[in-house]
Amino acid sequence: MESKILKALGIDPAFIFLFLLILIIVLFVLYVNVTMKYNRLKSSYATFMKGKDGKTLEESLVDKFAEAEAILKITKQNRMDIKEINKRMESDYQKIGIVKYDAFNEMGGKLSFVLAMLNGKNSGWILNAMHSREGCYTYAKEIVNGESYVELSEEEIEALDKAIFSDPYETDVKEKKKSKEKN
């Protein structure tokens, strides 16, 4: 069977046959590939929908969105609470400095002390308790921005410096551990 058209074009019918055979093989491979992907997608969908119909799936999604909104509200409230706590903490006593000393030469044991209590802005009080044989005398001096309007004694200045230059909430235990490690 010879075709006048193919003869006029100069094409051998064997080449057309080979081309169609290769095209069929490529299409078959693509068909198998698409079928395998479809089956994987179908099994994933079946696993996802297992035990659920459209209505229960919708309810589950609505519940999850409601939980997400509740978490967002709680997060916003927590942020507001933290800001409020930080504002309140500014006026709380955060820094403390204490110095023990002998107020009078005849007394021993360093029973007198100076206590400096400051907030985050270095404002607060210095309490000086002087112990003697006759009694104990306590004096309070106001500190504003790290300075006093009244003249301070040497021990009061030392306690104030300890409070100002200490980290907030630092304890003597930490200082003792550091000094032991250095020695």
Image (cartoon, rainbow, N blue to C red):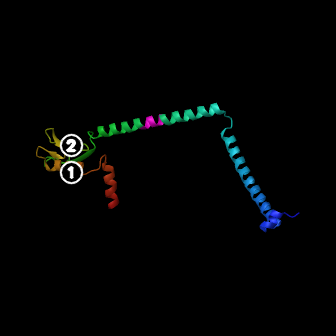
The residue identified by callout 1 is: 161
Magenta stretch prevailing secondary structure? helix
Q: Quadrant of residue 13?
A: bottom right
Q: What residue do we see at 50% from left, 37% from top?
A: 68
| Magenta region includes residue 120 | no
Badge 1 or badge 2: first in the primary sequence = 2
Q: Which residues are magenta?
A: 70-75
Check disc 2 and give the amino acid type: Ser
Question: Which residue is rendered at x = 32% and y = 40% of the image?
Answer: 86
Q: Are marks 1 and 2 in contact (CB under 8 Å)?
A: no
Q: Determine the image quadrant of residue 79.
A: top left
Residue 123 disc label = 2
In front: 90, or 65? 65
Residue 23 on image: x %, y %: 76, 59
Residue 74 part of the magenta-drawn span: yes
Image-based side of 50 in relation to 164, left or right:
right
Q: Tell me the quarter of the image containing the N terminus.
A: bottom right
